[in-house]
Amino acid sequence: MKPLIHFLLQHLPSLTGYTGRLRIKALKGDGSDRKVFRLFAGERTFICVSHPNGRQGIPSENDSFAYIAGHLRSKGLPAPLIQACDPGRGLFLMEDFGDFSLESVIKRIKEPRLIKRVYQTILKLLIKIQIEGARDFDARYCYDTPVFDSRFTWERESRYFIDAFLKGYLGWKTVPSSVEKELKSLAWAVDQEKHRLFLYRDFQSRNIMIWSGGIGLIDFQGGRMGPPQYDLASVLIDPYVSIPLNIQDELIDFYLQELSNRLPVRAKTFRENYEIIAFQRNLQILGAYAFLSRVKGKSYFEEYIPASLTTLKRRVAGPTFRPFKEVRRLVKEL
């Protein structure tokens, strides 16, 4: 805490002229090990982040966050304005988007028509993020590989599911080689999608803030280039809100209509690739919830595992997965 206080005392007066006593409130964390605080400086508030564990590597996770925040803002996208930062120590002072996430807003809406309208606005923004974010993007600042491709998918999505969920959470000793073979084939199928746009990596309702200034984006440090279907799946199969299947389908149609105004897209091919890539995102979600609940001790993530499993079972029951009998059998038994 002392490094953060020293950092704030050093930067805050030069930014705002505020010389009063600092008042800081710790905010509830989520899956990350970052510590987040709200700073009250007179009538203004700021978000303070302390993330010393994010300083390893060249570039580090903190370097990626600082670069991507500036890059997105330069494209007119609503990333927070960083007032001051010290990536080497993992310290940030930045714009405050308030307390209301997309998740909290959607859970207050009972009318499906209004839910659909809100998500249409979010998907329009997503397309801007994907296309504008890709312009002049310097992938050398990506701390966790520069591109989301089949190799990354196998190593960091499929194997994560095997190790963290099947073995770590369910206690499996081994996974049949026939299952691993099919999972590897599904991972390699990700490269069938030829469009490579900016990929947010965790574009879900807790990372999209709704505030008086509009929409704010947080937790984008994992950004890189990748297939557009991944972020679309992230926001649509998000277990925090559980969008009804019929609305998901309508929103995919809406997204395709909007995207086709900017890029040449074949709807049938896009949807086929969406099924494969949404499957990968689903594996990642289950792996993450298993890891966070069992290894990190954040057991409250367990409550979202049943919904994520239901989504996975529905997906593999579809025609895209008919050739993958071992995977279908595995998922059906979970």
Image (spheres, rainbow, N blue to C red):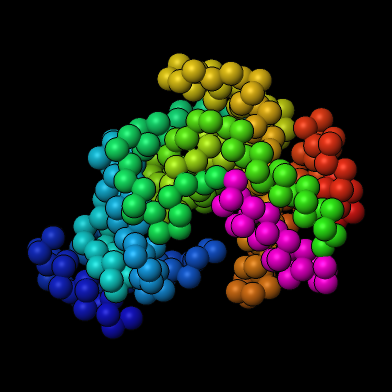
Question: 42 or 113, which lies in front?
Answer: 113
Q: In this view, does 25 lie above or below 45?
A: below
Position of 30 compared to 278: left or right? left
**Picture coordinates of residue 60, whole percent (x, y):** 36, 65
Task: Tell me the magenta residue range.
Answer: 150-174
**Picture coordinates of residue 80, whole percent (x, y):** 31, 50
**Picture coordinates of residue 323, whole percent (x, y):** 84, 36
Position of 228 compared to 83: left or right? right
- Is residue 297 at all visible to an observer of this figure? yes
Query: Residue at (64%, 75%) from the top-left corner?
Result: 295
Q: Quadrant of residue 275?
A: top right
Position of 245 compared to 334: left or right? left
Query: Residue at (48%, 50%) from the top-left corner?
Result: 207
Name the image quarter holding the N terminus: bottom left
Position of 280 compared to 91: left or right? right
Q: In this view, does 239 lie above or below 61?
A: above
- Tell me if residue 163 is in the magenta stretch: yes
